[in-house]
Amino acid sequence: MLNPTRALSAFTALAAVLALPQVAHATDGYFVNGMGAKAKGAGGVAIAMPEDAVAIAANPAAAVAVGDRLDVGFEVFIPSRGAEITGNQAGLNGTWSGNGANPFILPEVAYARQINDTLAFGLVINGNGGMNTKYEKNPFGSFGAEGPAGVNLRQIFITPTLAARVAEGHSIGVSPILMLQSFSMTGIQPFTQFPGLSAAPTKMTNNGDDWSTGAGLRVGYLGQFGPAVKFGAFYQTKVWAKPFESYAGLFADGGDFDVPASWGAGVSIKATDKLTLGADYKRIEYSDVAAVGNPLALNLPFGAENGPGFGWKDVDVIKFGAVYQANEKLTLRAGYGRSDNPVPQSQTFLNLLAPGVVTDHFTAGATVKLKNKLELTGYVMHAPRNDVRGAGSIPDSFGGGEANVHLAETAVGASLGFLF
């Protein structure tokens, strides 16, 4: 049997490794499409269908439902992203690949412990989301740009959790969110030369990785209704972050880059002794963060108060998953998720650097019990290519024309679950 104290020590060491991942991946906009290997195999469903300790990051109330366990997982993530520019009068026309960096290894770790019959503690460290592009052949070369162009955004959440069973079959939970994020931009040097385009031209690009910390709060509810139905819900506040000072000339409000608020609900139904079906709905309020949601409009300079952003709109996300207990040792999963595309056709020009436009996600997974207290979970995910064609996307001051962007994603992952 795994010793809980040693497990927590191992968890802490692994958490330190997780603090510097390569990049967190973008699926639901730039948020991850699921919390934990089991959820990811079932389309990302977890709000009312918690199966491992990482599910606490989807719904803090789940801490009382997952038992005593440590989950350690990783994902190999391979995005395919790029752009096409047509009809431009300033020499930008061409087809451009943003795949200069691939693949990415993304770890996550989570720990849950039942304190008594009423209270449970949890701790999850995982990537909330991110975005990466690297155009080795710079799309802005005709403007005089040198070197590769691209962005690298990484967001890591550390969420200690306390959950309480408030009545038979009903629990609530709360998770303070501590965030560490980093950002870098390269290859857009010519835009620093446009008069009045940036409030701080020297803090717009090629300033290396800038790190920022932030904090927020997530609350959740999980309830059992009869022998077969569970319902869950969560609300996550905006995560308020310190500005990226090295990119104060790029992001609105002097480098401010908060994480948008999100909320959602889910249901799971035990259809038979072996089959459980689940569905989640989530809303992500990208438009409420100026750097992300403000449109590309040049009446204000980049970096100014309420200045231009990437023009992302709020998205609705739905997920469906099925879990089938084939036998005592094998559990099978499958699922589908659908996220709105956050990038309007009018906003594709700046978003060739951040084309978070995939919508459909198909997943499958399985868990094998290796021993009485040890299980291995694996999954695959594919998000087919989605293209967004620009419409009035490139300002006349940059030569006009259209920017068309695309993104596809494939991921495989595995997790070890230690039960004690």
Image: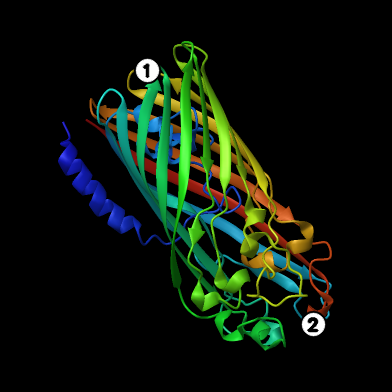
Determine the image quadrant of residue 340. Answer: top right
Q: Which residue is mark 2?
A: 90
Determine the image quadrant of residue 178. Answer: bottom left
Side (left or right) of 255 relative to 396: left
Mark 2 secondary-structure assignment:
loop
Q: CA distance from mark 2 to mark 1?
A: 63 Å
Identify which residue is drawn at 56% across, 77% down. 148
Identify which residue is drawn at 17% across, 35% down. 2
Identify which residue is drawn at 56% across, 81% down. 203
Which quarter of the rendering shows the N terminus?
top left
Residue in the foreground of this view, choosing between 21 and 137: 21
Q: Which mark is residue 327?
A: 1
Mark 1 secondary-structure assignment:
loop
Whether residue 65 can be seen here: no
Residue in the foreground of this view, choosing between 55 and 388: 55
From the viewer's perspective, is residue 127 above or below residue 373? below
Side (left or right) of 221 relative to 15: right
Q: Which mark is residue 146?
A: none
Q: Which three-letter amino acid code belongs to the residue tagged 2?
A: Ala
Q: Position of residue 309 (x, y in %)?
A: 67, 66
From the viewer's perspective, is residue 138 above or below residue 64? below
